[in-house]
Image (cartoon, rainbow, N blue to C red):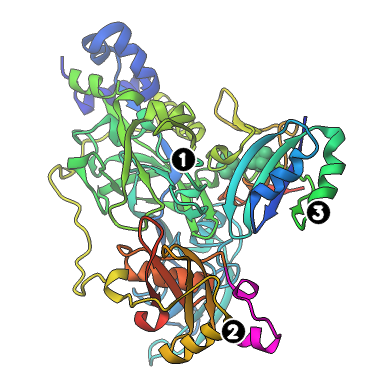
Amino acid sequence: MPKSYSEINQKIKNGDVVVVTAEEMIKIVEDQGEQVAAEEIDVVTTGTFGPMCSSGAFLNFGHSDPPIKLEHVWLNEVHAYHGNAAVDCYIGVTRMADIKPFDYGGGNVIEDLVSRKSIRLRGTSYTTDCYPLEEIDTYFTIDDLNQAILCNPRNAYQKYVCAVNSTDKTIYTYMGKLLPNLGNAHYAGAGCLNPLCNDPDYETIGIGTRIFLGGGIGYVMGEGTQHDPKNGFGTLFLKGDLKQMKPEYLRGVNFEKYGPSMSVGVGIPIPILNENLARKTAIKDEDIETEVIDYGIPRRNRPVLRKVNYKELKSGKIDIDGKEVKVSSLSSLFYARKIANELKTWIEDGIFFLNPPAENLPTNTTYNPMKQVSELKFVKDLKKPAVTCFDDCDIKVVAEKIIEENTNHIVIIDKDRYLIGIVTSFDVTKAIARDKSHIKDIITKKVIIAKDNEPAEVAARRMKMNDISALPIINDEKQVIGIITSEELM
Amino acid sequence: MLPLAIIRDIDDYSKIINEILKYNITFNILKFTTGSSGVNLLLDVPEDKIKMITDALTQNKVVVNKKGRVIVDDDKCIDCGACLSLCPTDALYFDESLRLKFSYEKCIGCLICLDSCPRRAIEEM
Ligand code: SF4
Ligand code: SF4
């Protein structure tokens, strides 16, 4: 027997609604079957709590006297976006503070706001006849604002990938710290508790759906950015009144060498209108499949190393090519459960009602890559022949080559062209000044290299990060096949 | 067996191994990583040999880090788990209710977790 929203809401009013969490629903459907579950269970609650970079808040400060038309706004030294009316702004969670950039950001400002801490507002203006004030420097708390609206263009990913790093260096990403040689793995999302996993055809979650957001009440505004329903990577655009929210469920996070973000708590109730929804909300971790992706390769299409499901991910260890890799989450499962339970209590206590969406989320949109008008250049397009010397030659020979070939970098190789090291014109000058005659006295052996098929920009960043001006290029056999210098990259 | 902390060596890690092998003891390599500072080795060696080996390594210009440990600030921690996969000894782990726990006994002070926490809840002691 199908149920309606109004029947469920009547039960909430009467105090006899039956609510379970998505984790509890699994066993109920397993033991009693979809049909009985659909009759007995009215609502299944879901929850997730993880870093969601596409989040932020609209704030309205009210007018100053004399009035100011803010052109640039800083909240605790974090630049907020100002392209709206005079005293509106949008604080985005990934924006870094001008001071302590990697330790404090927009996410922390929002956490401090909901913690009712005092926030410094600094603003400048070009001034107009109607807005004569040039500068403002004041303090406020969330209670001093007219509106504080959390507005997140992309939250609550249906599922996400698992990240590893195959290179020989530790990398710092938005997926956390990834150790070299598949030393660890990170995933995100709450698996079977994830809201959209429990309504994969978006039958009940749509525009206007009332939800738990950051400890307060929020609404789904529609599909999130990069919504990718065909691949099971749906997303949601969410909003809610920040003034009602709790700092426990909106936490500023700062990923080392990546920057700030915010962990957002989202919980969505799924009304069990029919048997299909009973079956769908009984989804298990092992039914949710995602991919292990190599974040060591800095390209849009990163290599997929294997398929994996959330049961394996939650077990703490996965196998990659025979290697046991420790895996953990960036999302808190403890808080995901807490959210699903809190929402359950709200409904049982009769303070939260369900509503049908004004419109359903699209199920057929595609997620496209960026259109780039200039052609992507690779290292191989910009490389030039490397000027080389053997490792046993005299410094004088090296010096002559530098002059002859008008270069600053001599790549030192052995007879089979295997890379031994690199010598710069500066090294040679130093050697002559200090009366050294052997290459081995001046050679740099820890050479940072490039590969033919890497994008030129990636090689350029490597030079910048290491403060060097050339990278020898090697093939898969580790033989030198050229060099790329900062000159070619300019 | 007690851990000996991280050893950083820019040249060749076999030098370290050979040096330790001279003492004719068994030891475990708990972690081998390469970073911007060179090769990082986390070794587990018998307690009574620590001084001897430390001296030998220091003479070979190998940097031996003093054993340090970390603490987790529960007020800052959000039980995400971003540190968990990095800990070589399971000193950082989840209890049954999936809250982060830290075992001081298991921690060997490798500090690999230190910069992994997005809440800056892990601090060096
Ligand atoms: S320092 Fe951190 S990673 Fe290392 S053992 Fe202790 S808790 Fe684990
Ligand atoms: S990474 Fe930090 S916040 Fe996350 S569980 Fe570890 S200590 Fe807690």
In this rendered view, identify the residue nearer to me: A429 or B55.
A429
Question: To which quarter of the image does residue A437 belong?
Answer: bottom right
B57 falls in the magenta region: no
Which amino acid type corresponds to the residue marked 1 in the rendered image?
Ala
The residue carrying mark 1 is A185
Q: Are marks 3 and 2 on the same chain?
A: no
Q: Residues within 10 Å of mark 1 (few under 14, many from 20)?
A: many
Distance (Cα) linking label 3 and label 2: 31 Å
B92 vs A296, nearest the viewer: A296
Query: What chain does mark 1 sit on?
Result: A
Q: For the residue marked with disc 3, what is the amino acid? A: Thr
Q: Ligand 1 falls in which quarter?
A: top right
A431 magenta-colored: yes
A324 shown above or below B43: above
Q: Residue furthest top?
A: A32
Q: Residues within 10 Å of mark 3 (few under 14, many from 20)?
A: few
Write down the residue under mark 2.
Answer: A428
The label on residue B58 is 3
Q: Which mark is residue A362?
A: none
**Looking at the rendering, which quadrant does residue A82 occupy?**
bottom left
Q: Is residue A417 above or below residue B116?
A: below
- Could you say where residue B54 lies in the image, as x and y percent from the top left? 82, 47
Is A358 displayed left or right of B117 in the figure?
Answer: left
Looking at the picture, does residue A64 appear above or below residue A239? below
- The majority secondary structure of the magenta stretch comes to helix
Front one among A431 and B93: A431
B66 w.r.t. A24: above or below = below
* Range of magenta residues: A426-444
**Mark 1 to mark 3 CA distance (whole Å):** 34 Å
Q: Amino acid at mark 2?
A: Val
Q: Answer yes or no: do the residues labelled 3 and 2 have beta carbons within 8 Å?
A: no
